[in-house]
Amino acid sequence: MGQNAPYHPTVSLNCFRRGFRGGDFISILPFSSFKDGKRILIVSDNGGWGVVSERVYNLIFTNSQSNYRSLSKNIDNADELLKALYNQGLIAINGDTIVNKEQYKMYKEYQLDMLILRVTNKCNLRCAYCYDSCGMNGQSMSEQIGQKAIDSALEQCAPVLDVCFHGGEPLTEFDLMKRLLEYGKMRAAEGGKYINFICQTNGLLLSEEMVENLYKNEIGFGVSLDGFKKSHNQCRVFPNNESSVDIVLDNLKVMREKKFPLPGILTTVTSRNVLDMVEICEFFEEEGFSSIKFSFFFPQGRGKASAELHPNPKEILRGFKEIIQRIVNREIWNLRINNLIEYLGNILLFDRVFMCKRHPCGAGRSLMTVDVDGTMYPCDCLGGNVKLGNISDMSLQTAYRSEGMRKLNERAEDAGRKCFTCIWKSFCGGGCPAHSFACFDDVRGIYDIDCFLGRTIFKDLMWALADGSELLEYFNYHIDQELLIKL
Ligand code: SF4
Ligand code: SF4
């Protein structure tokens, strides 16, 4: 057997406790197989996978069912092998599988844990791909709308709620953020819940004083930056078309000098920086940043007029393959590359802990977005497209039951989508509905980048996991251990 998934639920079958008996019935689950020296088997319904030798493949996986007596005649250590195959989700023993469709949490129920508040749609930049065509003449949220959204989210949420201040550029409304933070903390304490605040900023207003204020108020933050060179940041420009990168890097340099912890980076990958993905990771690793997330350009808002920014999916894959190799060589290690952690999470865990890699995704289920005027969206990326009502006259829970959510909910069960029969569906998550809506005006479509990566990267990661322990160690080093404790 190849690499065991480390966090599979421990199920003790009767036959494990009492020892196998001759008549114990072994059946294989429907699988797909890839061969490249070794053989990878994947079970698309439950996310099971494993690497087996040709001998095990021929003995077990060419018969749909057999019994322990006949298998054990030909296999040394048959008990251990069968337990391992069972724990990998590849076989059923006496009709039991480690994860059945009901247990498998691919289709998570409504359990809100993140609220995005678009406190403003004003922005001091004019990025070429901005999903909401933001500029300096926008609106900001009223405190009353912000409070209503927080109240409603605290009523519905899990014990912990993350509130993300978004924009536009949220730091242009720092006073409003602070007032909402005080309100949220007070309301959470009254309701016996815990609330965290974060914000996503373009980094231009991160003066020393602002950073101190953010830390004093316990507001975490991530910075959007498409790399460390002007050539990477040709899209992140001021209204006069000048690049913003030097100011942001100077601000981050001051943070390092003052020994503030460095933030996570959000990098939008376009045709202009796709060939630099490895170099970008190496730079942020060397500079001591904690994490990076690559977000792939999709044509929404101002980006609709910039089709040339669409990156080639093959070049993205090439970038990831090189990054994986750097990780295997331990040249990149301390930087958490969130995309890879999410992909690995769907390979190494049966539970789907990352909301963009579920089918259906967390939009509206784990996450709700409230716009400056109170309009509710299932996700900030679906903003403007899938409206669920207004927080002034309905709760987030009512919005969850609205017509707008129906199509999102139906998406995962839609037999007309090619994801329905795709062997990678339980690993991939079926692509982002916001990407689909931006391209096809319909959440049921599939964005080519999402699908290309879904069909290719999991296989590469499985081979890499089977070949050595480095990727598993990297995952264990970066995965939030608290996330695993909750499983
Ligand atoms: S709509 Fe896209 S970005 Fe939003 S939660 Fe779903 S997959 Fe993630
Ligand atoms: S997006 Fe593509 S790879 Fe992913 S499940 Fe759908 S068809 Fe399969």
Image (cartoon, helix red, strand yellow):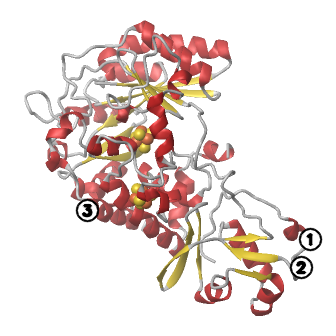
Name the residue rendered at 80%, 87% in the picture: 72
Cβ(mark 3) to ligand 2 < 8 Å?
A: no
Mark 3 residue crowding within 10 angstroms, few (<14) / some (14–19) / many (20+) = some
Which residue matches tag 1? Answer: 18
Give residue 191's quadrant in the image: top right
**Mark 1 vs mark 3, CA separation in Å:** 53 Å
Mark 1 residue crowding within 10 angstroms, few (<14) / some (14–19) / many (20+) = few
Please indicate whether residue 99 sits to the left or right of residue 471 in the image. right
In the rendered structure, find residue 21 and report the number of the disc placed on it: 2
Give residue 476's quadrant in the image: bottom right
Residue extending furthest toward the right? 18
Asked whether the viewer can see residue 361, the reply is no
Asked whether the viewer can see residue 142, the reply is yes
Q: Are marks 1 and 2 in contact (CB under 8 Å)?
A: yes
In the rendered structure, find residue 315 and report the number of the disc placed on it: 3
Q: Amino acid at mark 2?
A: Arg
From the viewer's side, name the closer residue of 38 and 427: 427
Name the residue rendered at 44%, 7% in the picture: 144
Q: Determine whether the residue tagged by mark 2 lies in a helix, strand or loop.
A: loop
Please indicate whether residue 114 sits to the left or right of residue 3 in the image. left
Task: Say above or below: 424 vs 270.
Answer: below
Q: Amino acid at mark 3?
A: Glu
Q: Nearer the viewer, mark 1 or mark 2?
A: 2
Task: Say above or below: 340 vs 119.
Answer: below
Q: Determine whether the residue tagged by mark 3 lies in a helix, strand or loop.
A: helix
